[in-house]
Image (tube, rainbow, N blue to C red):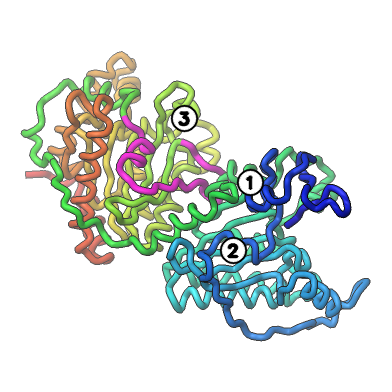
Amino acid sequence: MDTTPQRPGETNWLVCPGCRDLVYRKRFERTGGVCPGCGRHARLTAPERLARLLDPGSATPLRVEDTAEDPLRFSDDLPYRRRLREARATTGLESAAVAVVGSIHGTRVVTVVMDFRFLGGSLGVAEGERVAAAAERALDERIPLLVVTASGGARMQEGALSLMQMAKCGQMLAMLDEAGIMTVAVLTDPTYGGVAASFATPPDVILAEPGARMGFAGPRVIEQTIRQRLPDGFQTAEFMFARGFVDAVRPRSALRPTLARLLATRAAKAPPTAAADAVLIRDPDDLPRRDPWQAVQLARHPERPTTLDYAHSMLEEFLELHGDRVSGDCPAIVGGIGRLNGHSIMLIGHQKGHTTRERVARNFGMPSPAGYRKAARLMRLAAKLGIPVLTLVDTPGAHPGVEAEEGGQAWAIARNLHLMSGLRVPIVTVITGEGGSGGALALAVADRVLALSNAIYSVISPEGCAAILWKTPAAAPAAAAALRIDARELLRHGIVDAIIPEPGAGAHAHPADTADLIRRAVTDALRHLAAESPDELVRRRRHRFRNFGYARP
C-alpha cells in the first residue's frame, strides 16, 4: 500500500499523506487502505485488489503469450531491461497488469488489475497482451470483463509498439460490445494517458474510487502547456462524475457489492414469469368522464410518485447509473438496472422531485440534451445485455433554454426516436404524470404504452396552446378540453394501449399501491412481449407508430 511510516522502526503507526493524521496500521489495513479520518484511498497492489474483489480462492491466472522483452533496446539513465528486472523483483509480478478468471459473489468474471508499482502501471506490449487475452477469454466463456486501472499512460520505452497496444485493447472492447458481453471498469488513482484512452473509459459501466485522478493529459503537462491554473478538484473522480463521464463514485468498501449487483445482470435476463394479475382498462367507456383541467391538475400534483420512488418500490437491487459520456449528467432523467420479480430490467424515467429545492435541482423534470443522451446510452446497454426497457414518463416537456438549444436538443430527441424505433429488446412505457410534447415522446416509442388514470399526454401544454391560439394563458382549461389529453381520450384515440386505474384519490395519496399496480401491468406486458423475436418486436413497434393518423372506425 502507498503508506508512510511515522518514524523508522515505528511500524505500528502510519501518517496519512492527505490529512497528516496518525493512523494505526492494523486499522488502516482493515479498511483496505482508506484513512478513517479524511477518507483518502491509498493505492493497493494488484494482489491486494484481487483479494478484496474476488471470492476467496476463485482466482486462476490466465495463460498469455510471450511478448517482446525490449523491442527497441531502449536506454536512458538505465537500460530498459534492467528497469524491468528491478520492477519484477520489487513487485513479484511479470508485468503491470495481472489477468485472472475468478468470481464475485458466485458470478464468474475475467479480471484485469493494474499495479502502479510496476513502472507506473504503464501500458506496454505485455500489458496489452494481458488485456487482449482477458477479453478473448470473456468472449470464449461469454462472461463479463472487469478492468481495474491504475496507470500513468503508455510506456515510452517501447515506443510506437506501446502506442499500438491502445488500438489492440480498444478493438477487444469493441468485440465484446458486438458479442453483447458486459464490461465494467473501476478507475483508481491515477488513470491517465493510453490506458484511459483505450480500455478504461469505453466499458458499459464505469465506477471510480473517491478522489481518483483520471484523464488523458496529466495536470502537470496541461499547466505547463497552456500556462493556466487548473480548477480545484480538476480530473478527480468527483469532477468527472459531475460531467457525465463516470456512473458512480464508490468507496472501496462498496465496490465488491456494487460489482456483484452489476455482474449478476447477465444471470437474470429471463422475462418475468410470475403471475401478474394486472388490472387494466382497455375500453374508454369504462373510464369516467371528467373535467380535462382537473386531469391536468391531478397529473401535476406535487406529491405524485417520481421515477426514483417507483424504482425503489417496484425493483429489487436497483442501481442508478449516471452520465451521457459526452457532456454531463442531467438530473431530470434518471435510470439504472434493477430486477423486476427477480429478472433484470433497465428503468429510465423523468425525475421531478417533491420539495421545491429538489424540483428546482431537477429542473422540474425538463431534460437537457444530456438527459436524452444518457437515456440513449442506457437503452443501448439494455439492448447489448438483452434485457427489457421500462420508461416512466412525467415531464412538462423538453427544457426550453438557451443551453439546451446550444447542446443540440432537437438532435438529441430525434436520435432517441430513431434509436427506440429499432431497439431489439422489449420496451414498455408508462405515462405516470405529465406527458409533455417531444420531451415525453423521446422516452415513449415503445411496444406497449400504458398510462395511469390521472395522467395526461399532449403535443403541448394547455397553457402553451392557449397562449398561441387563444392569445391568453387564461384559456388553458379550454385548451385542455380541446386537446383531449386525459386518459379516456388517449385510450379512445389509441395513443395508449391501456389505462392503469389509480387507487382512491390517486397516486399521490396511495404511492405504494400505485407502484404495485404498475409492477403488475409491466410484468404482464413483458410476459407477452417475451414471446416475440427481436425482428418481430421491431416490426410490430414500427407498424404501431406507422398507423397513427389513419381514420379510425
Quadrant of res 268: bottom left
Disc tally is: 3
Q: Position of residue 417 (x, y in %)?
A: 36, 50
Q: Secondary structure at mark 3?
A: helix
Q: Position of residue 163 (x, y in %)?
A: 71, 71
Q: Which residue is mark 3?
A: 363
Which residue occupies the extreme right position in the image? 77
User: Can residue 345 be seen in this snapshot?
Assistant: yes
Q: Is residue 27 above or below residue 538?
A: above
Q: Relative to residue 443, is residue 481 drawn left or right? A: left
Q: Which residue is mark 1?
A: 210
Residue type (three-letter) at the residue carrying disc 3: Asn
Q: Which residues are magenta?
A: 305-331
Q: Is residue 91 above or below residue 301?
A: below
Q: Which residue is mark 2?
A: 51
Residue type (three-letter) at the residue carrying disc 2: Ala
Residue at 78% over, 67% down: 119
Q: Residues within 10 Å of mark 3 (few under 14, many from 20)?
A: many
Q: Earlier in the sequence, mark 3 or mark 2?
A: 2
Q: Position of residue 118 (x, y in %)?
A: 75, 68
